[in-house]
Amino acid sequence: MPVKKKRKSSGPAAAADEAGLKKCKLGSYCRSQASGKVISGDEHFSSKKCLAWFHEYAGPDDVVGPEGMEKFCEDIGVEPENIIMLVLAWKLEAESMGFFTKEEWLKGMTSLQCDCTEKLQSKFDFLRSQLNDISSFKNIYRYAFDFARDKDQRSLDIDTAKSMLALLLGRTWPLFSVFYQYLEQSKYRVMNKDQWYNVLEFSRTVHADLSNYDEDGAWPVLLDEFVEWQKVRQAS
């Protein structure tokens, strides 16, 4: 996820497919299997080894940039667009998409007790499990807003917002494809933090048929207009 690339979307299904959970490339376990090395759960974490691992991707710099991130994703066997990369970035408390600083890497990987590719791969199930925990998922969802936005902007541009929503809600929210279509044709060019937070709450509390939507509730205008738009579609 941290490799920020612009790409064309052909619609909500395609966006969800692109952004959805992709299976890790098992062939990328090649480092350990090609050498016949078996990682033991008893093998101690090494800060020195973790730092050397960081510099495999950062070179002499103190930050892993987009090129190093692509190599990192290739080595661990995960596509940059896979949601597991967003969860990892959240665990590292990374500030910017496409970059891991040395401080973020060392602090986050120490927390995960990972100092090499194989140890991180062994944590994939744990990272995925964070998406199934309601509280953790909410934190990841909220983190994604600041992580993905341009740091000189207070809001997400609408294309980035759609991509991130597809990644986070595309396979779990029954109304996602409809909401995606609404955003496609709407006047909105950005999504602010309040709107972003409320989309998650809306997805969790409002029925797919909108029957329990409270028009007098404190929903952002964006969601009021979405409900109105959808009801008109349903009635036609």
Image: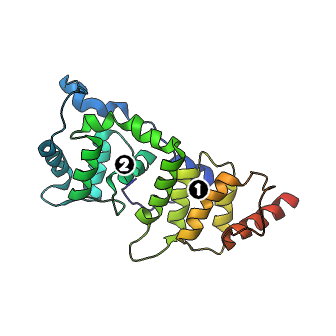
Badge 1, how many Cα within 10 Å: few under 14, some, many 20+?
few
Badge 2, how many Cα within 10 Å: few under 14, some, many 20+?
many
Residue ID for mark 1? 10
Residue at left offset 69%, top offset 73%: 221
Pick whichever, 47 or 178, lies toward us.
Answer: 47
Q: Callout 2, which amino acid?
A: Leu
Q: Callout 1, which amino acid?
A: Ser
Residue 140 visible to the viewer:
yes
- Asked if residue 13 lies left or right of residue 37, the reply is right
Residue at left offset 36%, top offset 31%: 26
Q: Is residue 20 above or below residue 229?
A: above
Q: Tell me where residue 138 appears, x and y as whole percent.
A: 52, 53
Q: Tell me where residue 223 appears, x and y as whole percent.
A: 69, 67
Residue 176 visible to the viewer:
no
Residue ID for mark 2? 88
Q: Tell me where residue 116 appears, x and y as whole percent.
A: 22, 39
Q: Tell me where residue 209 appears, x and y as whole percent.
A: 79, 52
Label 1, label 2: how far apart the Cα atoms are: 28 Å
- Asked if residue 102 lies left or right of residue 144, the reply is left
Across the whole image, how many numbered discs are drawn on residues?
Answer: 2
Residue 84 falls in which quadrant of the image? top left
Residue at left offset 46%, top offset 75%: 154
- Asked if residue 136 lies left or right of residue 232, the reply is left
**Which label sits in the foreground, 1 or 2?**
2
